[in-house]
Image: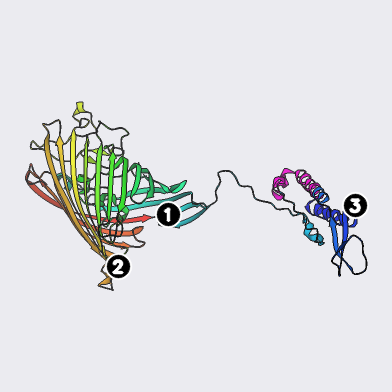
Amino acid sequence: MNINKIAIASLSMMSASWINPAFALDLYVDSNTQQIYAAPGENRVKLGSFEKKEEIDKLKATLKAEIEAELKSKQPAQADKQANPSEVITSLNTDSTNTDLTDNVATVETQPKVKKGYSPANLSYGKNGFEFRTDDDKFSLAIQNRVQARFAEPFDGDPRTLADLDKDEKSFMIRRARTKLNGHAYVPWLKYYLQYDWSQPVLRDLNLTVDKYKWAQVRVGRGKVSYNNERVTSSGSQQFVNRSIVNDVFTVDRQQGIEVKGNLFSGTWYDMTYYAGAFTGLGVGERNNDDGNMMYSGRLQWNALGGEMKFSQSDIEFHEQPALNISVAANSNRSKCTAFETDSRSCRNLTDVNAAGTARYRSPSETFEKGGAKSGQYEISQMMEEIHFKWNGFSFLHELHAKRIKDTLNSDQETKLLGGFVQAGYFPHRQVTAIPENIELAGRYAFVDMDTDRDHDKQTELSAVINYFLEGHFNKLSLQLSRLSIEDPIKLEKDAETRVWAQWDFSF
């Protein structure tokens, strides 16, 4: 017996119920007096056949039992083609005035099983790469990869000594190869971010952000300290092939800790964005602190025109209205580090010499007994001011850094460093239509003074770059020419070298 046979049987049973006097009663109404009679007569019109409610309930129970018994008897292989007995709904028309048998046929509906903890999802592609998102928007995951292929001649790094200028290391390289994962979990405002670098390799970022309130967003984990634009802006969103010679000397880089960000008075002339954080202060290469001191950092940004801009260089958005952000920042730390870089040995020492011609700063990778830096040896405080402007294809960025390093194991001797840069770029198509609209020209000047109380120790950079944006910052070609000069405070000599960079930055 199948479902159709059961339905036919139910029709037969229902038909019998109207014919059998034990189940049904015929009623008539007098057309003149409107009285009800149980027998026909003159002027009497039949109203219909009516059944007892008790008999209908009994019939429904019998029919339901037959359907459930039939479904349970099916083989497991056919289970996906049958309705679950617990999901069978039988409905019999109880309106005794309705004599249409088709309205009393049992109706069987099947519902798909829903697994506990399961939520359907969809796939899309956008600015963050391939994105998976559940239909209820409780979870999302975006996956993006980036490859940066570079040619460098005669060397790739930033020279810090005269000997660095003599290097002959012409090379092709995969400068960066990274995978990014980001999204949210459980609620849209609980966000996560992960970035891994395959070329080094190292876990660069891994953090959670509570992004529920615009005035206070809390980030916990590993990531860049929101200190200055040049470092916080991704290398894939830079205006030049790489950051200036200022970066390695003054960056506080990536750290492990907690940071709070908030935007206040949005839309007013005093629109402000603030950042405040506390960190371990050893970069990302070590789990524990080297002493009881933490790194503290703060940044205050006045969004003077156009609101808060993202950390991204070049005006690829072609701002129709001018956007201007003016910022100041400060940072303090006490550790064995005088410089940072994101790798497995991120706590480093600056390259410089003292009056005797020996290394001024001890290496944190060596033990103190072997001449390395001691835990908490260097007390560092630094400040920065920044101007960022974009309008109609033109962009301008300026930073000025000051840094003081106190050597607590060398009679608290202090060294003051100063550095800064100014860069500007423009899409000339707006003035010369013969130039493709996705070509940008930019220039930069940068300097570093390793000791403001000492002469003949300046380092300078003068660079020009041409960018060809195939798909914004996600797919661009860059050619950069730089003139780099170094002064030696011991030899009192100065030299310079020209460096060429050609790069393809590709994200997908």
Q: x, y (%) of residue 143?
A: 43, 50
Q: x, y (%) of residue 174?
A: 33, 49
User: Which mark, residue 171?
Assistant: none
Between marks 2 and 1, how big is the CA–CA gap?
27 Å
Residue at disc 2, secondary structure? loop
- Residue range in magenta is 59-87
User: Is residue 133 left or right of 345 when viewed as pictured?
Assistant: right
Between marks 3 and 1, how big is the CA–CA gap?
73 Å
Amino acid beneath label 2: Glu
The residue labelled by disc 2 is 320
The residue labelled by disc 1 is 129
User: Is residue 135 left or right of 9 when viewed as pictured?
Assistant: left
At a point 83% along the width and 56% down the height, the residue shown is 11
Q: Quadrant of residue 249?
A: top left
Q: Quadrant of residue 206?
A: top left
The residue labelled by disc 3 is 22
Q: Can the viewer see residue 63 in this picture?
A: yes
Q: Earlier in the sequence, mark 3 or mark 2?
A: 3
User: Is residue 54 left or right of 267 when viewed as pictured?
Assistant: right
Between circles 2 and 1, the one closer to the viewer is: 2
Q: Residue furthest front?
A: 33
